[in-house]
Amino acid sequence: MRNVSPADVIFAVAGILLSIFVLVQANGMSSTSTFAKVPPNIFPWMIGIGLLVAGLLLLVGALRGEKAEPAGEEDADPNAPTNYLAIVFVAGGLLTQILFINLLGFIITSSLMFAGTAQGFRPLPTNQRARAFGMDFLIGAVVSVIAYLGFTRGLGIQLPAGLLPF
Amino acid sequence: MDTFQSLMSGFSVALTPNNLMFGFIGVFLGTMVGVLPGIGPALTVALLLPVTFKVEPVSAFIMFAGIYYGAMYGGSTTSILLNTPGESASIITSLEGNKMARAGRGAAALATAAIGSFVAGTIATVLLTFFAPVAVNLALTFGAAEYFAVMVLSFITVSAVLGGSPLRGIFALLIGVLLGLVGTDVLTGQSRFDLGFAELSDGIEVVIVVVGLFAVGETLYVASRFKSGQSIIKLRERASMTKEDWARSWKPWLRGTALGFPFGVLPAGGAEIPTFLSYALEKRLAKNPEEFGHGAIEGVAGPEAANNASAAGVLVPLLTLGLPTSATAAIMLAAFQSYGIQPGPLLFATNGALVWGLIASLYIGNVLLLILNLPLAGVWVRLLEIPRPLLYGGILVFASIGVYSLNNSVFDLALLGIIGILGYFMRRFDIPIAPAIVGMILGPKAEEQFRRAMGISQGDATVFLTRPISAVILTIAVLALVVPPLLRLWRSRKQVASN
């Protein structure tokens, strides 16, 4: 075994597991076709088999030492190590939005999400974090209020008001 | 009605004050998102989908087309001044364009890109105008089998021909089709992959998948490998060229157009290949090829023209066959569907005002873009200086508004998060996004045509091979999948032999 990347192996295995899920689901579907000559499980079978083959090929490649090259985006360095803390900040912001938007309202959760996401892009020492978060929260609040009023009043889209009176 | 007359009636639609305004909003937003990192035309059109149901289809599509064209212009600004192209079609531009900018010739690079885009965009729109009716006549002979075949071809070109690895492209395509199949099968009432969630029984909204893969996936991924403090080349003047630059640019523009348009039309897979070909051609034809790699203006002019010409070409299969060959085109198809309009040959007969208004708006859009991009180049450049923490925070706020407002549903937001995580892993493991988007939108259409063809043939699967047009298209699809790897194998054998 030369330089096998565990991450690539895990990804290929995840692909294979997904294909098994698809095949099990396809197997559980009705294969009768009264109106169409093609029952509703033909495409699922084809996708399941396709994913299985693709997943196995990815696995073989990964075991032979192939490594996926992370995407090169405008602001991303493909060769940098993964910054897990940054992912936690961004995902935490989004999770706040999902869990509390109806309870607290769009403006509050969006401001929190904005500030959380911004922390993901600020490489700061821990003792400066609270201050930066506070500043970003204020900026996020301005953005969220403008967006809220623009979309609800201007475009007639509904967003949850939550705790705030407007 | 002949084409010219149709086009004139299209101008009468596109030139109404209301539609001119939507066109302007489109090219303005398009240029903006083209310049900004982290947000592109596909995401922008998806976010605007729910908002635009309140306006007429013609106005909405004029705006979408403006975004599509505008993003091409804006993308070249980023790749010239930042050297890290966001779209694959701009990679080539950054090769020479960034070198020019570093040598203080940024204004000329931006000018040849903008004027070249204008020349190519306008010529390609003329070609589109006169080629579309011909394609319509061909498409009118298509039955279900042919439509299925041409969708298979589109799948193969989008996933296997583009990008580095056909395997990873096809993996992405299959994931996309899988997402497209979630929900209740229309023909039989069988629920598929909905895991018992009532919210999934109507299928997953296209907007959620696009916003999840692009906005959320991109934000997670960029945060995980953020590269701060990039050098942006300062440019505060207007984009302009000297006489010598003009003399060196005009032939590459025309050659780039000639390469780009057919690649867009033929579902041969987007703008990447013609930009590469154009670059290689200009290098070969250049009087001083040693300048390439150090800022040769021909290396910006040709590929930029090819990029824009192929963008116009992509609209031919989209409008005449309902066949998208890029992520943005796929979302425009979804937009047509949500208005209850089916793009295809009949669209030209039933919705003439829409189609010709849209085509006419492309001419107007190119003029607007030239005006927006030459004198205002220095203004757009400032967008690159937006602090990234605030930019990505804002992207997520607007992403969640776009998704929440679909059904006022927290379930949709949770789905957005899950698909965003998928988008993160796709970027991390080099799985391209575009095939997944095309697969999600075109997959169910392909299934529909497959079933229709099988129904007509009484369940005889050979129908795809006995109908000549279908057989030819499927053969091309197989060749497109098989030939490139064989060529690579043959070349490496030859190298081994010669060593």
Image: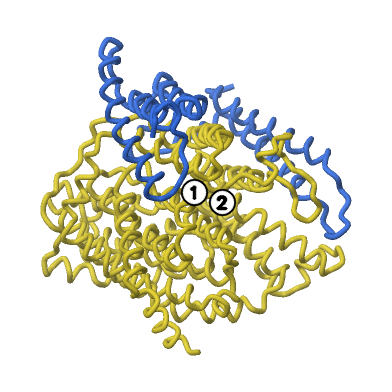
Chain colours: A blue, B yellow
Three-letter amino acid code at disc 2? Answer: Ser
Can residue B490 be seen in the rendering of this structure? no
Could you tell me residue B223's position as x and y percent? 38, 29
Could you tell me residue A160's position as x and y percent? 47, 34
Work out whether A13 lies above or below B106: above
Can residue B336 be seen in the rendering of this structure? yes
Which residue lies at the image location 81% right of the left edge and 52% below the top edge? B188
Element type at mark 1: loop
Q: Nearer the viewer, residue B423 or B97?
A: B423
Quarter of the image for residue A136 reads top left
| B102 left or right of B333 in image | left
Q: Are marks 2 and 1 in contact (CB under 8 Å)?
A: yes
- Per the model, the C-alpha gap separating discs 2 and 1 is 8 Å
Three-letter amino acid code at disc 1? Answer: Gly
Do marks 2 and 1 both belong to one polypeptide chain?
yes
| B310 left or right of B345 in image | left
Could you tell me residue B29's position as x and y percent? 33, 54
Quarter of the image for residue B201 reads top right
Task: For label 1, count other residues whose C-alpha is less than 10 Å away and answer few (under 14), some (14-19) or many (20+).
Answer: some
| B357 left or right of B468 in image | left
Chain for numbered disc 2: B
Chain for numbered disc 1: B
Which residue lies at the image location 60% right of the left edge and 26% below the top edge? A9
The mark tally for this picture is 2
Q: Which mark is residue B159?
A: 2
Q: Nearer the viewer, residue B474 or B207?
A: B207
Q: Which mark is residue B137?
A: none
Could you tell me residue B315's position as x and y percent? 47, 67
Query: Residue beneath label 1, please?
Result: B163
Q: Nearer the viewer, residue A38 or B19?
A: B19
Task: For label 2, count other residues whose C-alpha is less than 10 Å away and answer few (under 14), some (14-19) or many (20+).
Answer: many
Element type at mark 2: helix
